[in-house]
Amino acid sequence: MKALADEGLIKGFWGKGYFLSGSVNEKHENLIPARIPKHRLIYKKISADILNGTFRPNQPLPGINQLGALYGVSRPTICKVLEGLLSEKIIRRIGVRHYLYNTTITKRLKIAIVAFGLSRNEIKITSERERNFYRNISNTAIQQNVDLQILCYNDYLDTPRFHIPDGQDFYTYIQQADICGFILSTYHMNNSARCLRKIISTGKPVSICVEDQQVLESMSRYSRNSKGITFFDASYSTIPGKDVGIYLREKGHREIAYISPFHKSTWSQNRLAGLMEIYDAPKSHRCVHPLVRDEYVRDYSFMEKVLEKPTFATDVAIDKIVSRIPPFMKNRISSINMEYDILLRDALLFSYCEPLIRKASSLPLITAWVCANDLIACMIMDYWKFHAVSADNRPALIGFDNSFDAFERGISTYEFDTGGETQSMLTHLLYPNSSLLSKSRRIVRLNGSVIERASSFREPCTSG
């Protein structure tokens, strides 16, 4: 710190700490804001960790000494923080141990997951992140002694409908099933805001997973002073872009490219905004090059183009396939059809991305490429390998989603905190009046983490 002060980069004030030179009026030291008490900072950190799923509901919190070591503070500070959490009824004490308050549940409660599906109990899942989302909900529900009910909703029909057991009416079923709250999964919905309005009309608490453009319009309407309604945003905010920007900045990258063929979407726009917030600060000598196309929202938009004119039956000799397999295996041909459609979708995607790839390759000062998601990052990695671009001539490459395909190819990626998201959703429904979520602004935005692999851990190099 002294060396930085000697170079004039920072300035120290007795009892106040160090500040960047120029960030305060050095002639008026009394204008420096007072420090926030340490126990308040730790209180906020522990509260955030509870929301993010760091501490399990049916397990005791670490002991006082362990918490002190975990957060780097003294025993008296931790004791003061625990007293505050006890008074807010965020935790409870049993003997000498502390637990999250939802361990008081003894009755097995029911929560409904409302998700897009074409029939009862058949939720549409097309990505690993979706699969992890539902798996985490199931595991957390078991831990919290909660019974999950699946309600599939199809809003691509002329009249949207819920698939209810025995063909019951939605509101009749909700009353009979004794459901205490809803988790609205907005994956794949045509208009999730319309579905949300129906669920809200039941008067029961709702946790909303923000994964659809339409539900974003409802956030400003329902996120303030709306009792029992909370939005959980892991991927649509600027946080993922900022986290990736911080990672690349610390690695020494000064110019980066953001590549997205999905820039009509809010999530792509926000990831770029997060990167630019970190990189495009005045006098930072860093910049982001947006290489985007804004005709489409997501990869399924490209699939819809493929499905407009199905070609599998004409392109593939199905009769020859059928003649070579037992009759009971014929239903598996549909999976081959799906893979074929995905292949055509990716070919269409690449045709949109290729001009962006060529443009990024033509800018020699760019040392890192950030892709809108892992699908694009994997496509670029395969493209490099096909054209024998050596590792030394490749820029750093990073995507979003932490998919298995990215793992196989050694691509760095951003992992969303789906575990913390699902645990917070259930906590909200079981205790909608908890002080953790009863603030006027009912939007919970969760940080994820960068998973570093071979594609980005090298020193910055110019692209070839």
Image: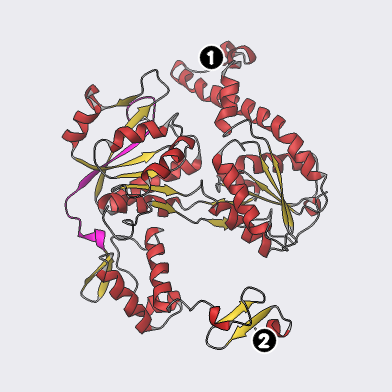
Residue closer to the observer: 125 or 322: 125
Q: Which residue is mark 2?
A: 2
Q: How many marks?
A: 2
Q: Is residue 237 left or right of residue 273?
A: left
Q: Quadrant of residue 157?
A: top left
Q: Quadrant of residue 404?
A: top right
Label 1, residues with CA under 10 Å away: few <14, some 14-19, many ≥20: few
Label 2, residues with CA under 10 Å away: few <14, some 14-19, many ≥20: few
- Residue at image position (64%, 15%) is 315
Mark closer to the chain start, 1 or 2: 2
Give the SS element for disc 2: helix
- Read off the magenta span: 101-121
- Residue at image position (24%, 51%) is 145
Residue 261 spot, x, y in % from top left: 65, 36
Residue closer to the observer: 78 or 55: 78
439 up-or-down from 2: above or below: above
Q: Quadrant of residue 46?
A: bottom left
- Residue at image position (25%, 28%) is 170
Q: Which residue is mark 1?
A: 322
Q: Nearer the viewer, mark 1 or mark 2?
A: 2
Residue 172 spot, x, y in % from top left: 19, 29
